[in-house]
Amino acid sequence: MALMMSRALEDTICAIATPAGEGGIGIVRISGARALAIASGIVQLRSGRPLGSVVSHTLHLADVRLPSSSATPPAETSAVPPRGGSVFDEALVVFMKGPRSFTGEDTVEIQSHGGWLILSLVCRACLAAGARMAAPGEFTKRAFLNGRLDLSQAEAVLDTIRAKSAASLTVAQRQLRGELAREVDAARNALLRLLAQLEAGIDFVGEEIEILGRQELLRAIQDVATRIRRLGATAREGRWLREGARVVITGRPNVGKSSLLNRLLKEERAIVTAVPGTTRDIIEESISLDGVIIHLVDTAGIRATDDVLEREGIRRSRSAQKDADLQVIVIDGSTALSEDDRGLIEQAAAGKHVIVINKADLPMRVDPSDMKPGAMGLPLSAKTGEGVEALRAAIRSQLVGGGAETTDGIIVTNVRHQAALDQSHGSLVQAEESIRGGMANELVAVDLRAAADALGEITGAITTDEVLEQIFSTFCIGK
Ligand code: GDP
C-alpha cells in the first residue's frame, strides 16, 4: 500500500482548478517534483528570467505556449489548434516551492484567460511536457499524504467549497483549521495513554504491579466516552447546518401557508428549488432560511377520499410530514380552532414543531395558550410580517440552538465521522462492561485499542486505500 502511494506521488499532476465555463481567468494547477520543469517548458516570463529563479509565491506575467516538441493537439478542439511552440495566451504564473504549498509539493499555477479552449490547451501543454492528469481530489489527497492536512481537514476543503450558508461555512472553516481533529486527537491520545498504562500492567502481571487501579481506569474511560458521545451528538445539528433541515409548513386550507412562505421568501431571496406544482403536488417551493431548508407542504388533502390522485397527494403529504425535521403548523387565528387543527397539532407533538397562529392582524378567536398542555402558539401575521422574526428565531433555536455548547462549538457534520465516533463509543461501553464484569486487562485493552483506532479513522491516523479512494473520489478534478 505504502509503495503504491509513494509511486503515485512521484508523478507530477495537472488539472484545471477553476469551474467549467467562461471566466475572466481560469487556473491550471501543476503539482509534483517536476512542476517547475514542466511549467518552464510552456511559460516564458516577460521579464526574460527563468521561472526557477523567481522568488517563491510571487506572480509573474508570462506568455503561454505549447512545448515546441509537442505534437499538434487532436482535432476535437473546434478552433484551429496552435502549433507546437506558438504562443496562445498570456498568463500570470506563480511558483510555490514545496513544502509551502497546498499539496506540500512544488506547485505552479498558471492563471490564463478563463476560456475552455485556452485552459484545455494549457492542460495539453502540461501533459505534453510530462505531467499526468490529476484524479478527482488528488491535490487534496496529496496534501493529506504529505501531512499538510489531516483527513478531517481534507474533507473540510470540500465542505468549504460546497457550503451554501454562512453557518455551514463557519463549521467547515473550523474543521479546516483542525479544530475537530484536535478534539478527536485529544480523546484518542487519552485512550492511547490508558492503553500504554494498561499494557505496562499486563506485562508486569507476574510481578503483581497494578499500574492503574480498576476504578481509576473505569473513570478515565467514562470521561473519554462522555466526550465522544457529546461530539457525536452534534452530528444531527451538523447535518442540518450542512444540508439544511426539512421544515414542513402544514395546516388546513386557507390558513395562510403560502402567504407565510411568500413572506419568508421575500425576506430571504434565496430560492433553493421551485418545483412547479399542481394543487395536489405537495412541495411547491423550498427556501433556505438562515441555512435551513424549508419546504411548503400543503396538507389540505388529508381526509378520506376515493380519488386516486388525491390519495397520492395525501400519501405524499403524510410522508413529507413524517420526514420533516420540524413542522410549522399554521392555524388561522381569526376562526375558532377546529378538529382538523387539533389533529395536526397532536400528530406533530412527538417531533420538533412550532405552532403559528396566523392572521394576527384580524380579531383573534384563538387563545395562544390553548394549543395543548405546555404548548404555546406564536401569533403572527403573514400579511403584515408581524411575528415572522420570532418564527425564524424559533425554527433556528429548535434546530441548531443547543448541543454545540457542550463541545466548545465543534460540530460534526460528516456521516463518516459520526459513524467512527459511534463505533469508538460502542467499544468504550464494551470496555466499561468488561471492567465491571472483572474481565482481564488484555480484553479491556482490545476494546480500548478498537476505540482509539475508530477515532484515528477520522483524522486519517489510521486509514486504508479504500477509505481514501471513497473520500477523494467525491471531489472534482482540480481540487
Ligand atoms: P393556504 O391555503 O394555507 O396556503 O393559504 P393562503 O396563503 O393561500 O391564504 C389564504 C387566504 O388568507 C388568502 O386570502 C390570504 O390573503 C389570507 N391571509 C393569509 N395570511 C393572512 C394574514 O396574516 N392576515 C390576513 N388578514 N389574511 C391572511
Image (tube, rainbow, N blue to C red):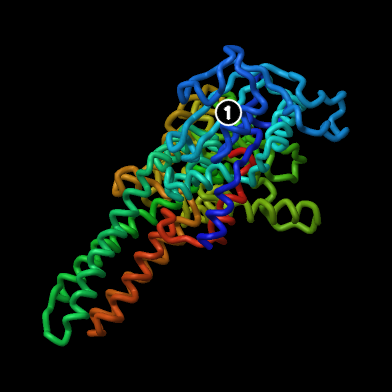
Residue 75, given in percent of the width and then of the height, sits at 88, 33
Residue 425 percent location from the top left of the image: 36, 65
Q: Residue at x 73, y 51 (%)?
A: 313
* Residue highlighted by disc 1: 109
Between 264 and 10, the one lying in front of the other is: 10
**Image quadrant where residue 330 sits:** top right
Q: In front: 92, or 162?
A: 92
Is there any visible trace of residue 329 in the rendered image? Answer: no
Q: Is 184 placed left or right of 288 in the picture?
A: left
Quarter where residue 39 is shown = top right
Which quadrant does ligand 1 occupy? Answer: top right
Looking at the image, residue 372 sits to the left or right of residue 264; the answer is left
Image x and y of residue 365, in percent? 49, 36
At numbered mark 1, what does the secondary structure look like: helix, strand or loop?
strand
Q: Is residue 110 left or right of residue 398?
A: right
Q: Looking at this view, is 444 or 254 the one in front?
A: 444
Going by the numbered disc 1, the residue's amino acid type is Glu
Q: Position of residue 229 (x, y in %)?
A: 34, 59
